[in-house]
Image (spheres, grey):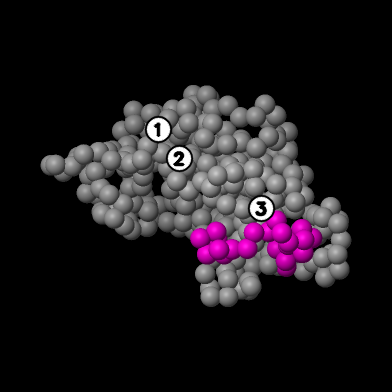
Amino acid sequence: MFAVGISLLHIPWPAVKPASPYHGRFAPTPSGALHFGSVIAALGSYLQARASNGLWSVRIDDLDKRREAAGAADVIRRDLEHLGLQPDQAIVYQSERLADYQAALARLQTAGYIFACGCTRREAVGIYPGTCRNGLPPGRKARSLRLRVPARRIHFRDALQGVQDIDLTTQVGDFVVHRADGVIAYHLATVVDDAAADISEVVRGADLLAATAPQILLQELLELPTPAYLHLPVAQDQQGRKISKQNHARPIADQPAAQVLVAALAFLGQQPPAQLEQAATTTVLDWAVEHWQPARIPAYNPQRCR
C-alpha cells in the first residue's frame, strides 16, 4: 500500500498555524473581479469560520495562466476588502507552491498510480474510456498524466447536500493530475494545499460537488486528512445560467458593500433585516456572524438573480 504522510511531503504554509480546530478557506481563480456568485462562496465560508470561532484563509488558485486575467488577484483582494472579508493569514498563491505539487505527483508515480495518456481533451470528453490505461497505443505520445482510479466507491456526507455515494469507475474515471500544458491539475493542487493549511471544512459552490470524490481519493492515497464539506447553492441569472465571469456577471466593486452582503445573506436563507442595507459593513457582518444558521441554507438555488 502506498504510504505517504503529510510529513513526507514537506509542504510549507504560512508560519501561523491555526490554534482553533476550525479552519476554512476561500479559493478563487483570478480570472476576473468578484461577482455575486463568488461572493456567495466567500461569505458562506467566512461566516462558517467566524461562527465556529475559527480561522478563515484566502488562497488564489492561479496555476492556469491561460485563465488568469492581468491584475485580477489584486482586484479580488480589493473586492474582499470592500466587503470587509479579511483573512486571518497572508494570502497564499498556488503559483508559489509548484515544488510541493510535484513532490506529491512523484510519490503517486512511484506507487504506480499514474499512467501517461496520449488522448486530447476532445478524445477524452466525459468519463475517460481507458484508452491509454494499459500503455500508450502505437503512434501515441504522452500528453498528460492520469490517476489510475480503483474500482470502488467514495462515500461521504455533505453538510448541506447530504449523503453522497460515488462509483469511481462509472462516475469519475481515470482523471488528469498533470495536464498536457505542464500545469498541475486542480484536484491534486487542491488536496495538497488544503492539507498543508489544516483546512477542517471546505465550503464552496455546489458546482464543485462532483470534484469532492476524486479529491477524497487523492487524500486517501497520499494519507492526507479529509476535511468536512459543505456545498452551497449556485447563483443563477434570469436565464438559468450560473452567474460567472464568462456570462459577464456584474462586478461587485461598484456596488454598495452592505447591499451586496445583504443580498448574499438573503440568498443563503439567513433572512437579514432590510435596514442592514443602509448599515456599515462591519455591522452587517457582525449581525451575520451572530445569526448564522447553516440549517437555513437552501440546498439548491432558491432564486434567480438580476
Q: Is 273 above or below relative to 112?
A: below
Residue 105 numbered tag: 1
Residue 278: x %, y % from top left: 86, 64
Which residue is denoted by mark 2 in the rendering?
188
Residue 19 numbered tag: none
| Pointers 2 and 1 in contact (C-beta within 8 Å) | yes
Q: Relative to the observer, which residue lies in front, 150 or 92?
A: 92
Residues in magenta, as a range: 243-266
Residue 302: x %, y % from top left: 63, 72
Q: CA distance from mark 2 to mark 3?
A: 22 Å
Q: Relative to the observer, which residue lies in front, 39 or 167?
A: 39
- Would you say residue 305 sits in the magenta stretch? no
Q: Quadrant of residue 125?
A: bottom left
Q: Is 116 above or below relative to 201?
A: above
Q: Amino acid at mark 3?
A: Ala
Q: Is 123 above or below relative to 107?
A: below
Q: Quadrant of the N terminus?
A: top left
